[in-house]
Structure formats: C-alpha cells, structure tokens
Amino acid sequence: MSIKIQKVDVGINFTEYCSNIIEKASSQYEKIVFICANRRPIRFIEQKLKIDTALKVDFFTIEEFARFLTITFSKKMPKVHTPIERDIFFLDLIKKIDSLYVKLGNSDAKVFPWAKKISKLFDEIDRQLLENRLSNFQYVEAIEPAKNILENLKNLYKIYKKEYEDFTYNGDFFIKSIPITESDKFQNRYENSCFIFVGTVYLSNSEKRILKNISNKNDIFFIVQDDLQRQDKFTKDNTNYDFETFSVVDRLIKQLKSLSKCEILESAKTNNRTTNIDFYEFSDTHLETSFIAETIKKEIQTTENKKSADNIAVILPQSHALLPLLSYLGKIKDIPLNITMGFPFSYTDFGLFIESLFNVVIDMKRKPKELYTVDSKLLLNLINSPIFSVFKQNKFNISEIKLKIITAKSSIYKFSENNDFFTSVLKPFLDINKMGDFYNAIKLLPDMIDKEILTDNEGYEFTSQVIHYFYTEIANSLEKINSERECNTLLAYYILKELIKDLSLPFEGQPLSGIQIMGMLEARLLSFNKIYFADVNEGILPFGDKIDPLLPESIKKEIGLTSFKEKEMLMKYNFFRLVYSAKNAVICYKSGDNTIEKSTRSRFVEQLILLKEIKEKQKITVNMPKIQTIKSLTKNRENKIKKDKDTVRYFENLNNLSPSSINRYMNCPYQYYLKNVKNIDEQITLDADFEYDKVGTLVHKLLEIHFKKYLNETVNKDIYLKIEKDIVKDIEKLPKGFNYKSEVAEYLGKLNSFQLDALKIILKFRIETFFKNTSYDFKNFTPIYVEKKLENSKLHIYGFADRIDEIQNEQGKIIRIIDYKTGTSTPFPKKNLDSVTIPKTPSNNATYDNTTLNAIRDAFGSIQLPAYIVMAKEKFTEEKVEASIYQIGSYQKNETIKSMSDKDIKIYNLALQYIINHMKNSEYIYAFNGTHCSYCNYNHICRFADNTVI
Ligand code: SF4
C-alpha cells in the first residue's frame, strides 16, 4: 500500500476534480474515506456525486475523523470536555499546586486567564506529540507568572496527563487515534477501502503517525493544489527571483515521502491560466464594503448564471466588515446570499451590553457594599446601551437615572437599596458566590426583554438571533459546570469573556447557490469566477506577529510547536491559491489615511503588484474610488418595510395629528413608526443639546409670561424693548420667581451657583440677541393670543401657536402665527413648491409610494408652518394669515425669522392631505435615510441608518 500524491493546478475547479477522483475510486474500492481540510468544499463535492457513489463515501474534516475514531473505537469512552469545562479543570489543577496558584495571583479570577493559556498550550502539545520535548524551562525574559509556569511546565503536563484520564479533548482525540489506526478492529473495518486526503498542506506529528498507520494497510490518495505555472518566479536584470509562495507544497511532499512508500501521480495542469487582478485603496471599512456591495449589485445584473455558487465570492479576513457589507448589499432580488462565517458576538449590541454590565458590577464590587455606588460614566455607558430599547417598557426608569446623573453632574451615582434597576439587573451579578448563582444571573436577563418588540418589529431580527444564541450557547456551557463550585463576580466576568470571545453568530444562507461571503479559511479549496478580498493589510493578511505572553517564539521552536513563520507560510499559500484560482480578483485594502489607526497594505499585495508590473511591463495604478461615486451608487437603494396588521390598524385609526408628528412622518416615516407605532424611546443624547431642552422650555415660558401682559395692546418698539428688559430681569432673579412646577423647576433646583450663573449668561445672551435681531425692521403689532390651540377640522389636525399677533400694513390686517424654536438645528421651511406635483385630489386611489412624499419633503423641508397656516385659516377666515418661525438660538439676523404667507394655501392643504393619506394608505413604511440620520435619535437601532462619514 502506498501514498499516491497528485498536484492539481489551482486553475482547475478542485471540487469538481475531487468528485471525479471519488467516482473513479468507487469502482476500485468498497469504501472511500474522504478527509478534507475544511467542511465547506465537502458540500460542493457531495452535490456532484452520483447517489450510488455518495453512499460509499464517509466525509470528514481531519478533526472530525480523529473524534470519530476515538468515539467509535475506544473501549471506555472518556467524557468529552467543552472548552470552558477544560479551562475550569486547569484552574482547579493549578489550585492544587499551592505554590504555583499563589504565584499566578492567588485568586481564581487572576489565575483563570493563565489556566486557559495552559489548557490551549497542552492541547497543541498533545496534537503534536511533544511530551518528550518538554522541559522545565528557565526563561528569565518572560513575565513573572509565565516564568513560574515555564519553570514547572514538564511537571505540570505530567500531572495533567494523570488527572485527565477520564476526559478528552481535541489534541487528545489525535493521540487516541494513533493506536486505533494500528488496531485490527480499524483495519477490519476499512479493509478494501481507500483514504483520500485533500486540502491539507501542513501535518501535525499525530496526523503523520495516523497517515503512516493507515498507509500500511490501505491506499491513500493525497491531492494538493499547487501553482503549476509558477507565477511567482521571475527574472530581472539577469537575476532569478522566487517568492516561494507555494513552497509549503514541496515541504509537504517531502514529509509524506519520509512516512511511507509514495507514488507521484501525473500532475493535473491547465493551459494559459490568467487571473485579472485589480487593486483598490480605501480610507475606511464603510467605503470599502459599500464599494464591494454596490459593484456586485451592478455586476450581477449582467452576469450569466446569476445563482451559481462558483460565480462571486467576497473574502473577509476580519469579521467586523461583515455587517457593513450586508447592510450595503441589502436584499438582491432573486439572488441568494450565503454567509459562511460567523459574526463576533462581542461586536454586537448585546455583547457590548454584557461588557458594560460587568464593568458596572465590578466597579460596584470594589466599593463598599452598603453604599450601592458606581462610577457615573460606567453606568451611563451601560444605560445608553441600545439593548434597553428591547427591555420591557417602563420596567426600569432608565431615563430618570440618566437625568439624575446629568443634572447632578457627580462622578458617582448612588442607587437606593430598593431601586428596581439595581435589584433586577445588577444585584444578581453582584451576589455571585457559586457557579450556580452565575448561571441563574445569566438566565434572569431574558425575562427582562420584551419578546414582542423583538418578534413584531422587523428591525430586530438580528438582535433577536443574538440574544437567542447567547442563551443557548452560554447558558448551556455554564450549566455543565458544577453549580456548587465557588465563583465570584470577577471570575464570572473572565469566564464569560472567554466564552464570548469564541462565540460568533452563524448566518443562514443557501450554501450551494448565490453570492458567497466567507473568511479565508472557509474558502480553502474553492474557486470562483470573481473574488473580492477586503482588508488585505499587514496585521490582517498575514496577521500580526502576536506576542504570546506564555510561550516565547524561541521556546516554541525548541519544543517543536508551529512557529509564527510557518503559520505565515500557510496563510500565504491560502491567499495566493485563492487569487490564482479565480478568473478575476479584486484586492481591496485600507490606507488608513483618515483613521487614527495607520494601515499598511499587505506584503501579499506588494508581491501581486510587483509581479503584475513585471508581467505588463508598466506601472500599476491602484484605484481609489471617490466618496461621491460610492454615495451615488448607494443612493438608489429603496428602503421600506411592509406594514403588518397592527400597523395598518394603527394608521387607519389615526386622528388629531399635530404639525410636528406630520413633519416627523414626512421627514422619515420609519422614524415616525419607531417612535409612534412601536413606542420606542428616543435615545437621549448626552451632549449639550440635552440641556438646551430645559433652556428652551425656560425661554418659551418667559416669553409667554411677558407677552401675555400686553395681550390686545399695541406693542411698539419701546414696549418691545421693555419686554426684553423685564425678561432679562427675571432671568437674573432665577431660580426665584419662577413657579413653573416641572422638571425644569427640578433642574433649576439642582444647579450649583456656578452652573446657575452660566445658565443665566446663556439665557440672557439668547434673549438679547433675539430681541436685537428682531428690532431692526420693527413694526408695531398686537399680541392677541399666547399658547393658543389651533385646529383644522377637515384634516383633523391641531397644534399650539406660541403667540398670535395682529399686524396692520398697507394691505390691511394680517394675522401672524409664531412658533418659537430654540434648538440649534431646526430645519427651516423652503418654498420650492414649483418642483412638486401633488395629486390634485388625493384619495385612497392615489399612489402612496415614496416618490411624491419625497418630493413634498424636498420642496417644503418642514411642513409645520404650512400646517399652522391651514389651521389658523379655519379660525381667521377673513384675514390674511402668515406663519413665522422665530429662531431664538440663532446669532444671524437674517436667520432669525422665516415666514410663509397663506398665498399657497391650496398647495399646503394638498400636501398635508397627501401626507395624512399616505400615513393611512401606504402599504409600506419608508425609511428616508441620508446625512440627517446622524442627528436621528433612532440611529442606534435603525437598520436603514446612513452612517456614511463624509
Ligand atoms: S436613522 Fe435615518 S432612516 Fe433611520 S429612522 Fe432615523 S432618519 Fe430614518
């Protein structure tokens, strides 16, 4: 029996080639064991086999094979450990060695990270059969805890082997598989069978032994992909160069030859294979992923065989680019997406929520227990988590806690002992004494989440999946650990951190069709017509030389463990194999010019560029797509959700709308939907604008009080300036004389003297600037109402005018409706009404898509003033009416007042009627995203949010 080695050129479709090999072998052997480097190609190969052949084949990855052998052939099956069970086993093992436990930190929380490192190291030593190479190393340059471990390494391994007899794990499966593959039982089972190994270019010592044993009795086919055109060899200035990109293949063949009798089969070649390679540079991930997504969307329209899984693939070496890519790709009609990579749980809102929760409880744990205090910033971080938007409404008064933190401006927040948030969310984690408490605290969280928000709201599918996955994976792992084992908050945090680190969310998809999105390792052995690579940067591809705090590279080499250099060679092979196997490759990398982190394009990119320049005998230009190009590509995306039954009912029953709610709908129906239909609280921003809410209420109230005194009296300039002086006097007296019982009064009461002085200065400056700006073209007026309710019975709308004046001019009496605005970013109404065609008689039969609504939005900017005019005209039927916004935050004279007359009232009526009808009749809720999304208080949960940084 022998090992038959065959090289296959990377240009040949490898899965197809393998399926042909299997078909041929099936006529010579009773059974075929097919062992592949990774699982994904197996699905493609299985699909291509005849049914009779497929029934003869057992498919495995190498890890699955070792596990299968251990489970099937072991006389007494040891307990298979989960990663966290194994880490806890090592923690307990170190605890038994008192001196080492003390040196590593003398507490479970401090020793746990080392236990995890030792667990991983010993697993690798098992797989590499390196027990005999171990020593108790004296390594003075290592950090103190590592030094202590290295000094005891051999002894520790011995104790581990003795104590681990009843358990098993990854590396141990390989150790156990060696004698199994020598056994009669194994050989009888696989008599007349052949083994086909594909995709492996690196063999561990245990794998070599297993291969050697199998080759004694069975035929082995070892098929490996290679660049048979040797594209990385070139001659320049009479010197030969070789990048040795595929040297791992030659090394592998050498190793196989040393194991057993080998037969080299004729290589499978292709003629004149070429890969067209383009290079693109981006400043950040969003630009990069939006470019990839939009290019794919354009290209797919003209691609034949659109649904083929061999067509287009995107390789993401880092999973953080996955969500931006998916959001830019959206749903492409009739084209399935298949994502063969997980999204790291720690990057999700829920992952960040867990991290913030532990930051808070660990901080509380450090402080005296009876004080119930926490660092305000850590608490703010936690309660700002978007996850609270899916907590049961009103269960904890998060906004109240936020308000208290902001108004008190103290670095410490004190909970009352009975505070609901404290007892329900924090206390279970503070009171962890045993593993069982930890498990119970984790299990309590789902009860606080409002499942209806998750299931009823289309935007929450991912959050729902994240939360569900967290509980099935984490809670199940914790349940397996002895519930009586001692634990504490800090250890719980470390354990959770480790569990979360390895947790990534699988995406559903159709593996055998459509656009394929995957990581580098998942793409092994596959080939595509066009392949997009993201993030081909140093530190990513190849990944950086991470310093191992436990084991320096020199000791790794001495023991015989895989060195960083070897790992880099494997990565290089995988990358170039993938590039050369494609007809077209798009290599994207980040320049990092616009980010804090400096990014350098990968040495792999440099190699490709150099080779291309030599081949084409000219300098290669790297494309740098402009932001505008990408933006215009993304602009045409239609974002909408279909109304469900409850939403349809909500809109049908709408009545008595206010101008501001109509305006909200017009500007972004999806924002209206989140706020008004789903009742989701807006995210309270913690910037200065939050306080401007209070400042705004104060200004409104002061103006109301003082203009009320002059109702139905003519206000000339002197009186006007007197009003200003009286208001300023009132400001100086603050907080006295201000009997406005509200959160504003509460807010004033909490300010210290410095803050109060600062507030007075701001208020005075605003009032004085406002009166100054409105005094230039002053005309006498008569205030006739303040805080006056207006309505329109036909449209069923109502609102409150801040002030209503009567003015006399040459044309007669004019009624002026005033709306004070105190924010800094209020959109002014435009008067671009010629650009919009509103259906003349909006009815239930009109089209309620996004086109007309968008046009109205573009024409009006804000619909509030037209709404005031329409309402005022119902009361002041005979008079001319104009409506004005008085912008009190503005320093510019010409931006202080914006007015609209009733001249176009017919269009206002039509526009308002259309918007209201749109609310009631549109089948969809549209999201009008754009640059304004960055100011939207739903940005954090909105899946349509445009977060493009310009
Ligand atoms: S983030 Fe943008 S798209 Fe989403 S609700 Fe807000 S404005 Fe609309």
Image (tube, rainbow, N blue to C red):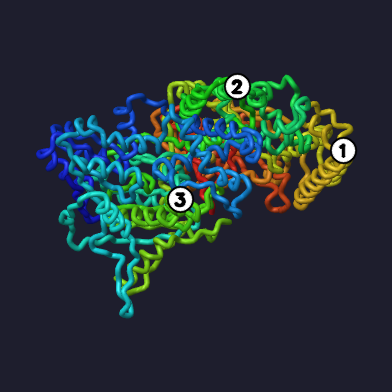
Direction from residue 123 to residue 20 in the image, left or right = left
Residue nearest the observer in this picture, 804 or 613: 613
Direction from residue 423 to residue 634 in the image, left or right = left
Q: Residue 443, relative to residue 822: is it above or below?
A: above
Residue that mark 2 sits on: 437
Q: Are marks 1 and 2 in contact (CB under 8 Å)?
A: no
Q: Which mark is residue 559?
A: 3
Q: Earlier in the sequence, mark 3 or mark 2?
A: 2
Residue type at mark 3?
Answer: Ile
Instruction: Identify the residue at the far bottom of this view.
Output: 237
Label 1 packing within 10 angstroms: few (<14), some (14-19), many (20+): some
Tell me the element at label 2: helix
Residue 571 drawn at (x, y percent) = 38, 53
Residue type at mark 2?
Answer: Asp
Residue 408 drawn at (x, y percent) = 78, 35
Residue that mark 1 sits on: 730
